[in-house]
Amino acid sequence: MKHILRTLLIAQGFLIAAFAMFSPIYAIFVEKIGGGILAASSSVAAFSIATGIMVYIISRWENHVKHLNKMVRIAYALSAMGFLGYVFVQNITQFILVQILLGLSVAIRAPALDTLYSRHTDRKKGVSEWGNWESMVYIVSALAALVGGYIAKTFGFNALFFIMFLCSAISFVFSGKK
C-alpha cells in the first residue's frame, strides 16, 4: 500500500472515530440540552441538508483547486472546531449551528478526500484498497461507539467532546504528512 493511502486511512480513521464516539448517544445529549425527538431529528436534518447543499456547491469549486490536500486539512480543522464547539452548546439552536459547521467540514472534505484517495489507488489493487477504506470505517466506528459510550458514562459529555476534538486534531496533523 502506498504511503499516501496509509496516511489518508489513518487521518480519516481518527475523524471517523470522533464522529462514531458520539453518534450512538447523540439523542441522549440532545435531551440533556432540553430537546426531544423532534430536536434530535431536526438537528440531523440540519446537518444533512447543509452537507448536501454545500457538497454540491463546494465540489464544483474544488474541481479547480490545485491542492486538494489543503482542502482536506481545512476540513479537519473545521471538524475539530465543531467538536470543541459541542462543549459550549447549551441549547438546541446552538447545537444546530454546530451541526451546520460540521456539515460544512464534511462538504469540504469528502469530495476532495475521495478524489485524493482515488488518484493514488493502484489500478490492479483498486478494489482491495477501497476495501481497506470500507473496513476501516466499520471497524473504527464499532470500536469508537463502545469507547464513546464508556467515556460519556464515566467522565461525561465534555470529556467525550474533548477527545473527539483531539481525534480530529490528530487527523489534521496526519493529513499534513507527506
Image (cartoon, helix red, strand yellow):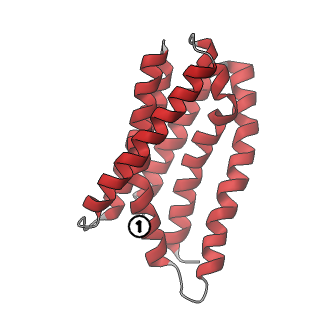
Q: Taking 160 as reference, is 171 above or below it?
A: below
Tell me the quarter of the image containing the N terminus. Answer: bottom right
Q: What residue is shown at x 54% (from left), y 84% (from top)?
A: 122
Kind of residue at disc 1: Lys
Q: What residue is shown at x 55% (from left), y 20% (from top)?
A: 39
- Residue hosting label 1: 178
In the rendering, at what x and y percent does residue 103 appear?
43, 41
Q: Secondary structure at mark 1?
A: loop
Question: Where is residue 66, by image quadrant?
Answer: bottom left
Q: What residue is shown at x 64% (from left), y 35% (from top)?
A: 23
Visible residue check, residue 3: yes
Question: Where is residue 35, by image quadrant?
Answer: top right
Q: Is residue 81 left or right of residue 33?
A: left
Judged from this view, the residue extending furthest toward the front is 38
Q: Is residue 78 left or right of residue 120?
A: left
Q: What residue is shown at x 62% (from left), y 16% (from top)?
A: 36
Q: Taking 3 as reference, is 48 above or below it?
A: above
The local crowd at label 1, few if under 14, some if 14 to 19, many if 20 or more residues have their Cα within 10 Å, is few
In the rendering, at what x and y percent does residue 21 appear?
65, 37
Q: Nearer the viewer, residue 15 or 41?
A: 41
In the rendering, at what x and y percent does residue 18 appear?
58, 40
Q: Taking 122 as reference, is 158 above or below it?
A: above
Q: Is residue 64 left or right of residue 18?
A: left
Judged from this view, the residue extending furthest toward the bottom is 124
Q: Taking 143 as reference, is 23 above or below it?
A: above
In the rendering, at what x and y percent does residue 17 appear?
62, 45
Tell me the quarter of the image containing the C terminus. Answer: bottom left
